[in-house]
Image (cartoon, grey):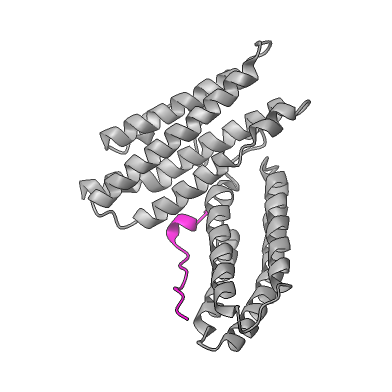
Amino acid sequence: MEISMYEFTDDCLTGNKQIDDEHRMLFQIINEAVALSSEKDADNVIIMKSMLAKLRDYAEVHFAHEEEYMEKTSDPELARQRIEHASFVKKVDEMRGADIDASNAQEAVKDMLSYLIKWLYTHILSSDMMIGKLGNDGEPEKDGTDACESSKADGKGSEMFVFADRFRTGIEFVDDEHRKLFEIMAEANELIRADFLHDKYDRIMHILEELEEYTRHHFADEEEYMEQIGYPELEAQKRAHAAFVERLVEIDFNDIEAMDNNQQEYLTELMDFLVGWLTNHILKADMKIGEYVKR
């Protein structure tokens, strides 16, 4: 049975050394199982069970560290992270208790590894990437590097939804599409923060659907361009794009509509997260495309 090793690439770096080191270790645990896998199905069952036990124990330690740090920094994504962490541990427990024997070992092992690595990539790129980059009010922190520097003169941080010169990659269509994404987010943000506006939530839902559709369009254009120029980090970009789209898809409009007291708070934090992620991705990843083209 031949399974590829999984690489912890630079696009998975959050900038927090402890978190990054622990993410590397999670990848290493999975890769150890890959390296030990053999043609003997019975052996693979033993290897997989051992890996799942080790992965669960280490994941719990890592999640505790991550949540403790997020609690200290009053990270608005903490509640969501706790849910995702608990879901992962539960899934691993289910895998450990699954009925695997020599007759279904190969397929079961492949499915398990596929799930685990997809979850890790998606969780890191769509959630962990923003740890420490959102302040107490849910807006990106100023760290002088990859965070969105927002002016809060109006008390609403509206500047963070403006396409500024520092976001220009030098690739015209990419910059134009990024500008459009900022415009869509700014429109949604204005509606969310507007008081006493009749039926504003229907309009917000429509804009969020437009955001998802245009985001898919932009990522497809960007990936096609990277493929044409032979960009070496295309696969990393695809992973990040897929993770962000999955985050958008997870937005349950029915749940939002059913919310009562915290509907406004949820939507505000959601928009701050989305624009923070886009800002971070442009400055850390998309800028490299422009640099590659210049070289």
Q: Position of residue 98 (x, y in %)?
A: 71, 72
User: Residue at 61% across / 82% down in the picture?
Assistant: 103
Q: Residue furthest left?
A: 295
Q: How many marks?
A: 0
Name the foreground residue: 279 vs 209: 209
User: Residue at 73% across / 61% down in the picture?
Assistant: 90
Q: Position of residue 57 (x, y in %)?
A: 71, 71
Q: Residue furthest front?
A: 103
Prevalent SS, magenta region: loop
Q: Quadrant of residue 178?
A: top left
In the picture, measured across the screen, residue 166 lies left or right of residue 151, that is: left
User: Residue at 52% across / 75% down in the picture?
Assistant: 31
Q: Quadrant of residue 254?
A: top right
Q: Is residue 233 visible?
A: yes
Vertical position of residue 125 compared to residue 279: above or below: below
Q: Quadrant of residue 55?
A: bottom right
Name the foreground residue: 197 vs 105: 105
Question: Over which residues does the magenta segment extend?
Answer: 1-14
Vertical position of residue 3 compared to residue 15: above or below: below
Vertical position of residue 144 compared to residue 154: above or below: below
In the picture, measured across the screen, residue 238 lies left or right of residue 209, that is: left
Q: Position of residue 249 (x, y in %)?
A: 56, 40
Vertical position of residue 177 compared to residue 4: above or below: above
Q: Is residue 156 visible?
A: no
Q: Position of residue 132 (x, y in %)?
A: 60, 46
Name the foreground residue: 21 vs 220: 220
Q: Residue furthest right?
A: 261
The question of residue 193 being in magenta is answered with no
Name the foreground residue: 143 vs 147: 147
